[in-house]
Every structure is written in structure tokens, then in C-alpha cells.
Image (tube, helix red, strand yellow):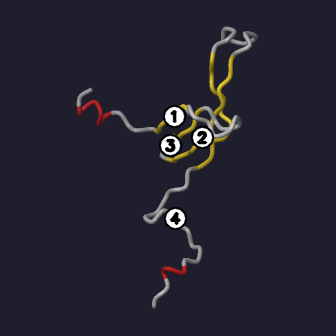
Amino acid sequence: MTEETKKKRPDLGIAIPVVNKKTPQSYDLSGNIVVDGKKYKFGAYKSQASGNGKMPKGSEYYYFYRVEPLEDQAPGGTPAGDTSFQPSELEA
């Protein structure tokens, strides 16, 4: 892929298959995505089609369980717009 092609393709997020799940309830797929300029984080579970719908029996798919806005992080790791009290920011 050339540099010019890379510049034309926007980065719309990343989906990462979770291989080493901490618990059986952990998501099988997680990541973030950009929709209309807004960032969202998501979690999805892996499943297999029953064959009663449009997909052939046994076909693997992911269903999204969580999709929520991703809070922007300000420098220092705190969410942007965070107005909580930070004792370390007091003048000496």
C-alpha cells in the first residue's frame, strides 16, 4: 500500500479479537470505532448461526452487547472536561 493510498483511507477504529479472556463472560471482540466524527467503544460476543435465519447453520458471527461513547482523555489520563478536585494541582 502506497503512502498516498494510506492518506486517503481514514482510520475509523479497531476491532480486536480477545484470545485470552479473563472470565467466560468477557467479550470475544472489543475495540473502538468512529461514527460521524464521534468515538465509541464496543464489546461483542461470538456466536454461531442456528440455520433458521439468513446465515447457514454453524456460521460464526459477533453480536454487539455494549456500544457507548468513548470519553476523550486529556493529557495526564483524566477525561476531557473533568472538573473533579485534584489536590496535586493546588499551589504550595
Name the residue beneath numbered marker 4.
Answer: 78
CA–CA distance between discs 1 and 4?
24 Å
* Amino acid carrying mark 1 in the image: Ile
* Amino acid carrying mark 4 in the image: Thr
* Amino acid carrying mark 3 in the image: Asp
Q: What is the tally of numbered marks visible in this picture?
A: 4
* Amino acid carrying mark 2 in the image: Phe
> In this rendering, is residue 13 above or below 71?
above
Q: Secondary structure at mark 2?
A: strand
Q: Which residue is situated farthest in the bottom direction here?
A: 92
C-beta proximity under 8 Å, tags 3 and 4: no
Q: Nearer the viewer, mark 3 or mark 1?
A: 1
Residue 36: which disc? 3
CA–CA distance between discs 3 and 1?
21 Å
Q: Nearer the viewer, mark 3 or mark 2?
A: 2
Name the residue beneath numbered marker 1.
Answer: 16
Q: Position of residue 7 (x, y in %)?
A: 29, 37
Q: Residue at x 48, y 37 (%)?
A: 14
C-beta proximity under 8 Å, tags 1 and 4: no
CA–CA distance between discs 2 and 1?
10 Å
The earlier-in-sequence mark between 3 and 2 is: 3
CA–CA distance between discs 3 and 2?
16 Å
Name the residue beneath numbered marker 2.
Answer: 42
Q: Residue at x 51, y 34 (%)?
A: 15
Quadrant position of the C terminus in the picture: bottom left
C-beta proximity under 8 Å, tags 2 and 1: no
In front here: 34 or 44?
A: 44
Crowd class of label 2 (few under 14; some 14 to 19; many from 20; radius 10 Å): some
The earlier-in-sequence mark between 3 and 1 is: 1
Q: Position of residue 80 (x, y in %)?
A: 51, 63
